[in-house]
Amino acid sequence: MAKAAKTIFFCSSCGFESLRWLGRCPGCEGWNTFAEAPAASQMRHTAERAPAPSLVALRDIEIGDEERISTGMREFDNLLGGGVVPGSVILVGGEPGVGKSTLLLDVLARLARRAGPVVYLSGEESAAQTKLRAARLGSADDVLVVAASSLAPALDEIERAGARMLVVDSIQTVYLEGCESGIGSVAQVRECAQALQHFAKRTGCATFVVGHVTKDGAIAGPRLLEHLVDTVLYFEGDGAAGLRVLRSYKNRFGSVDEICVFTMGAEGLREIAEPSKRFLEGRSTHASGSCVVPGIVGSRPILLEVQALLAGAAYGTPRRLASSLDANRLAIVLAVLEKRAGLLVGGQDVYASVAGGLRVNEPAADVALALAIASAHRNRALPHDLVAFGELGLSGEVRAVGQSERRLAEAVRLGFHTAIVPHAARPAAAPKGLHVIPIDEVGRAIAAAFEL
């Protein structure tokens, strides 16, 4: 009697594996997300057994100077570390309608005119629908389009065409016939990702993979998907707004946390070469509750406006809301201000945000946030040409942060004349035209800001 095929259960939200069905996923705590799939795929990547690997010392390995592929978009190339590495696999995620397909079509169109051939594999739309969506770019006629969901025959045709770059839109809409699971299941996504990785490494074709996101904002599919690829990019920003931020969360060939800022217009996405100017557009120089922080995003300095608003609490418990800021950091800064600087805000609602929608995670924004809250509390505007940065400790001390010189240089370039900096991070020689005020305690920072 034939032995029954073994099965395993996968969480459709986070990819958690279990030998039995569970009502609630231990990984993401989602309910009724488990689906049954074969424990081992029937797919075979090669017809013959792979040869035994050989052991090679690192000193004997020769590394060629393989030139990266330039997309013709300077900011996008910098985000990737200098261009697209041939044979790499890049995962692009984001909310629906944020511009993933538009950006990748534009990248293919630029490369097709200079290096071609390039292929757009669509598992969601027909070739005619793709043509209609690409028409506004005006120069995508040379892009080869494959409208198919079966991945294996499509890859064979793409390999025969000698494509240099491939876009798969999306990984959740393609399937391999050897895998006995439905389209979009955890098993299918895993097998398709492995097949695309093998194809890219074997042929040298750089491959962009579009990934859908879950309701929690994470890329759908098993966690293995992000481990398999070389680079993970994620679109941030409201789908209805005109500003888009593409951030690098993983990059084997460059630095992480780099960003590329776009605006969405009638002709698609357009790069912003000066993000600092874009994020400071429309800034009021006479309103209270505002302070500019020179932050470091990836490897570049960017000036951002931190805003705060205090209002009377309508209910017994005051609200603490943070947008594009860490809510825990906001709570810490409020506690330090009340205990160490005598700023009594315990009975007021506090709202804090970063103008422009770019999320700030570094503690260097603590001092700017504290000054914005103090400005809102006193209803008195800070000097419009002031920047501030530094990390707040629980005892009220202002700690040093990295790359102070680059932060100050960006502030000078944008026309700022005064900077409040940690005493331990004061530069040996201040940039020309900038008055640097070193401070070591949050109370002194507030006093110095309002004495200007």
Image: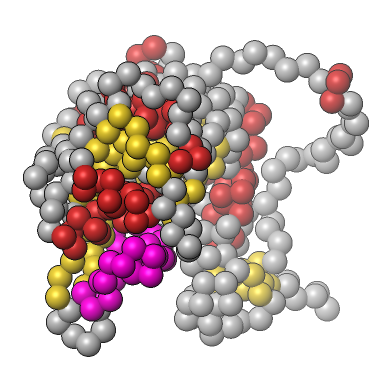
Q: In the rendering, at what x and y percent does residue 367 appear?
A: 36, 50
Looking at the image, residue 212 lies above or below residue 89: below
Is residue 219 shown left or right of residue 373? right
Where on the picture, by quarter, is residue 71? top left
Residue occupying image coordinates x 25% and y 71%: 345
Q: How many marks?
A: 0
Residue 202, can we see it? Answer: yes
On the rendered image, what quadrant is the N terminus found in?
bottom right
Q: How is the image coloured?
A: secondary structure
Picture coordinates of residue 182, whole percent (x, y): 51, 63
| Near-viewer residue (286 or 283) | 286
The foreground one among 75 and 44 is 75
User: Which residue shows up at 34% across the image and 51% down it?
Assistant: 444
Residue 280, horizontal then vertical, whole percent:
20, 38
409 lies left or right of 97: right
Q: Residue at 71%, 47% (x, y): give it.
A: 44
As drawn, 402 above or below 309: above
Query: Quick one: which residue is furthest to the bottom in this view?
Result: 316
Q: Could you say which is closer to the camera, residue 381 or residue 239?
A: 381
Residue 260 occupies which quadrant of the picture?
top left
Whether the magenta-drawn stretch holds residue 359 is answered as no
Q: What segment carries the magenta color?
A: 319-348
